Amino acid sequence: MLLALSGIHKSGIAHKDIRLETIMVDEVNWEPIYTSFGLACFNEGCEPGVASPIYAAPELFFITDTEHTERQMDADLYAVGVTLFIVKFGVPPYEFTDVGSYLSLVSENMITTQLTNSGDPLLKLLGMLLDKDYVIRRNAGPAALAQLMDRVAQSQKQSGEHNARQQAERQRAEGQRAERQRARQSPEERKARLDRQQAEKQEWESRRVKAEDDSMSPAQKRATIESNLAILGIPEYTENIADIKKVYKRAALKAHPDRGGSAGQSAALAGAYNTIVRLLSG
């Protein structure tokens, strides 16, 4: 809201009728859009008057002559403060029954003092916007207030990071608790747990492989079989599992580490043979 208002003010325009009903929200970008510029004024063409009393800065009740828009811009800031106050608390900062009682409430500046003394950056921002002294609002300005809003966002971000750290700590504590629980298990219980985990892992791996096999076209299956036949040393395509098994056994004996081969060669041959049998049997 403050950044959007800053753009309006930089164009030399004072809105003069900011309230909940004259602010819309872009549903795509969630950015505020100011509407109802019927009372707006440009440069030095601002006529005196109050559009909505509960949103009116106190100085507006004393302006009787046409003057520069700067004073009206100060009042726009006050109206934004009232709008934000209503959004946060559901009621305006001051009730308006008549000008005298309203100005008396505003002149005490009690709400502003309470807000600016708060540790909450958003409440401090409201206090600056609702200050009875337009000079304070003007010196703060939309840009400075927008920077304060950035600090509000940063504070919220830090709060989110704090929550994430707490979640990580809870997960770590849960992991440590589970680890202690596992440590208290007997050897038989630990073995049974590891066996279950291994069986679950194998089951999931089997399902994954089957899903991959089922997604292959006939041409893809044939190409996969041919590449694995080549690993076994079979140059031509064949679907005779018995012959393939004989070749695999001979190749596996030669590749055994005890016969000058290596564990890697043995594993490659076993993987190729198992893949061929799985695809031909599926």
Image (cartoon, rainbow, N blue to C red):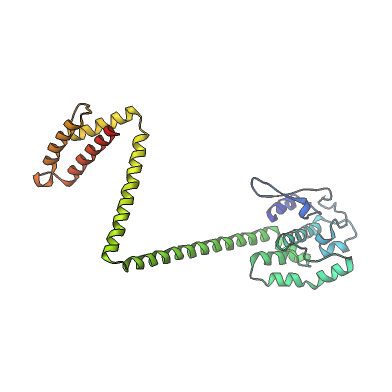
Residue lying farthest right? 64
How many badges with numbers are in the image? 0
- Residue 138, quarter of picture: bottom right
Please tell me which residue lies in front, 93 or 200: 200
x, y (%) of residue 20? 76, 55
Question: Which residue is located at x 89 percent, y 68 percent?
Answer: 100
Q: Is residue 12 visible?
A: no
**Image quadrant of residue 78?**
bottom right
Q: Residue at x 28, y 67 (%)?
A: 186
Instruction: Tell me where residue 28 appears, x and y as whole percent.
Output: 64, 45
Residue 15, compared with residue 228, is above or below; it is below
Location of residue 259 in the rendering, given as x and y in whole percent from the top left corner = 9, 44
> From this viewpoint, which residue is outermost toward the left?
259
The picture places residue 126, in percent across and down from the top left corner, at 71, 64
> In the picture provided, is 154 more to the left or to the right than 2?
left
Screen quadrant of the N terminus? bottom right
Compared across the picture, whether 245 is left or right of 128 comes to left
Quadrant occupied by the C terminus: top left
Relative side of 143 to 132, left or right: left
Does residue 171 appear in the picture of this structure? yes
Residue 210 vs residue 31: left or right? left
